[in-house]
Image: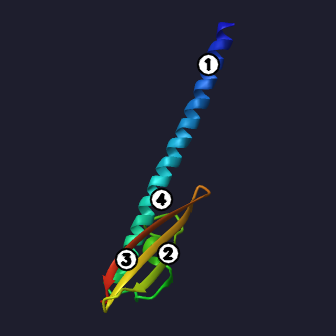
Amino acid sequence: MEAIAALAVFGMAVVVASSFLDVQMSAARRTEARADLVRAAETLLESVRGGVMPLTSGDVDLTDEFQPMSTIRVRTTLQVTQCPLPDLYEVRVEVRAMVRSEEMVVSITTQVWRP
């Protein structure tokens, strides 16, 4: 009887431990994905600041620059609006990716002078 109770307690401990590990792995993956999304947004912003990317709104493909660093597939959008001052633009970068059936979104908004 005691052996059955001990096995039941052990079984419950295994179930709890496995669910805890799954939660930890999910949290780690979300953290890693968020870092990748921030890196993609910063890459696009620096490309705009440096004059490599034109100051035009639209979807941007970062596959060549981003895929070697990350396994997730990102979608990036660039929104550009003219500010009241000449040659000053507000630039908003939005990066999206699906991580474990959950959509993650990171956006950065800044102002950029025409390069």
Question: Circle 4 — which element?
Answer: helix
Q: Name the residue under label 4.
A: 33
Distance, label 1 to label 3, CA atoms, is 54 Å
Residue 33, image x and y in percent?
Answer: 47, 59
The numbered mark, 1 or 2, whose residue comes first in the sequence reads 1
Does residue 23 appear to the left or right of 90 in the view shown?
right
Distance, label 4 to label 3, CA atoms, is 18 Å
The numbered mark, 3 or 2, whose residue comes first in the sequence reads 3
Q: Name the residue under label 2.
A: 76
Q: Name the residue under label 3.
A: 45
Q: In the orientation shown, which residue stands out farthest toward the top?
A: 1
Q: Tell which of 86 and 46 is nearer to you.
A: 86
Dot 3 amino acid type: Leu
10 Å crowding of disc 2: few (<14), some (14-19), many (20+): many
The numbered mark, 1 or 3, whose residue comes first in the sequence reads 1
10 Å crowding of disc 1: few (<14), some (14-19), many (20+): few
Dot 4 amino acid type: Ala
The residue at 41%/65% (across/down) is 38
Question: Which of label 4 and label 2 is nearer to you?
Answer: 2
Question: Which of label 4 and label 3 is nearer to you?
Answer: 3
